[in-house]
Image (cartoon, helix red, strand yellow):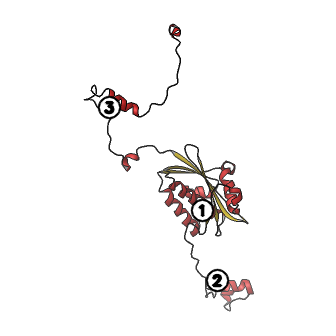
């Protein structure tokens, strides 16, 4: 109230420019001749950079397999809220679990290209999530190869959390993978559509089975089931 007579006006504080420190040093150079205002540090090393906390990114992945083919949808969300979206169309035959692994592998590769260190990955495939987390056992050579490839990529991050979420909470990736499976470039607009020609894992070699089976202990049993034929030996026939 006492200062009201001076007609004071409140002005918002502006950003302090970098040259303000230089002006201060020039103006008071003699007074601070023997005092250091700026502490010089050596350039940071990889070990020192590890001490700084890395922000968490969020990755949504999903897949679709239908008559139009197979595809994957990937949405990478930055800590600032920016979305990086990608749709992938598979030119090769892929079953549901294979396409789910392909979506996860491609999403991890995109995150690595963006320099992500800490990643939360969300997928609606309970089977794949539990296999990667160690809750379920991978059955089949092809599934085991997909699991190894995924674990190798996860090992390149500082920390990765893989979570299973309901499909309705994975809607963005779900829409992209449906477009990618049908290769609908018109609907995608500015979202990039990639074409993946071959799987991310090497093809599994299938052994050829000899068509002429050899005589085994099962041969007389098969003959009896198919033809009703019994062995000549009465004991074996009984």
Q: Secondary structure at mark 3?
A: loop
Q: Is residue 97 visible?
A: no
Residue sitting at x 40%, y 46%: 49
Query: Rounded to the nearest whole Å, what is the CA distance between mark 1 and mark 3?
Result: 55 Å
Residue sitting at x 62%, y 84%: 217
State left or right for residue 229 relative to residue 214: right
Query: Outermost residue toward the bottom?
Result: 232
Q: Nearer the viewer, mark 1 or mark 3?
A: 3
Q: Earlier in the sequence, mark 3 or mark 2?
A: 3
| 197 and 170: which is toward the camera | 197
Q: Is residue 99 above or below residue 121?
A: below
Residue sitting at x 66%, y 62%: 71
Q: Position of residue 84 (x, y in %)?
A: 59, 51
| 201 and 185: which is toward the camera | 185
The residue where tag 2 is placed is 218
For the residue carrying disc 1, how many other residues have a C-alpha within 10 Å: few (<14), some (14-19), or many (20+)? many
Q: Secondary structure at mark 1?
A: helix
Q: Position of residue 96 (x, y in %)?
A: 66, 63
Where is residue 224, by image quadrant? bottom right
State left or right for residue 101 relative to residue 182: left
The residue where tag 3 is placed is 37
Where is residue 195, by image quadrant? bottom right
Q: Is residue 171 visible?
A: yes
Q: Earlier in the sequence, mark 1 or mark 3?
A: 3
């Amino acid at each position: 109230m006492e200062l009201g007579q001076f007609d004071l006006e409140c002005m918002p504080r502006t950003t302090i420019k970098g040259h303000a420190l230089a002006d201060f040093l020039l103006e008071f150079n003699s007074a601070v001749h023997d005092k250091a205002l700026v502490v010089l540090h050596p350039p940071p090393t990889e070990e020192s950079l590890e001490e700084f906390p890395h922000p968490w990114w969020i990755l949504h992945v999903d897949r679709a397999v239908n008559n139009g083919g197979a595809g994957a949808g990937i949405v990478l969300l930055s800590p600032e809220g920016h979305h990086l979206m990608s749709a992938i169309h598979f030119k090769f035959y892929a079953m549901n679990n294979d396409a789910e692994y392909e979506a996860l592998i491609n999403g991890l590769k995109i995150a690595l290209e963006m320099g992500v260190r800490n990643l939360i990955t969300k997928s609606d495939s309970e089977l794949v999530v539990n296999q990667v987390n160690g809750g379920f056992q991978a059955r089949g050579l092809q599934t085991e190869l997909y699991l190894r490839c995924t674990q190798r990529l996860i090992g390149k991050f500082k920390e990765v959390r893989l979570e299973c979420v309901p499909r309705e909470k994975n809607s963005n990736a779900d829409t992209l993978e449906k477009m990618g499976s049908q290769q609908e470039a018109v609907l995608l607009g500015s979202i990039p559509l990639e074409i993946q020609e071959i799987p991310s894992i090497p093809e599994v070699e299938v052994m050829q089975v000899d068509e002429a089976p050899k005589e085994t202990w099962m041969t007389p049993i098969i003959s009896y089931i198919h033809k009703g034929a019994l062995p000549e030996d009465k004991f074996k026939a009984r």
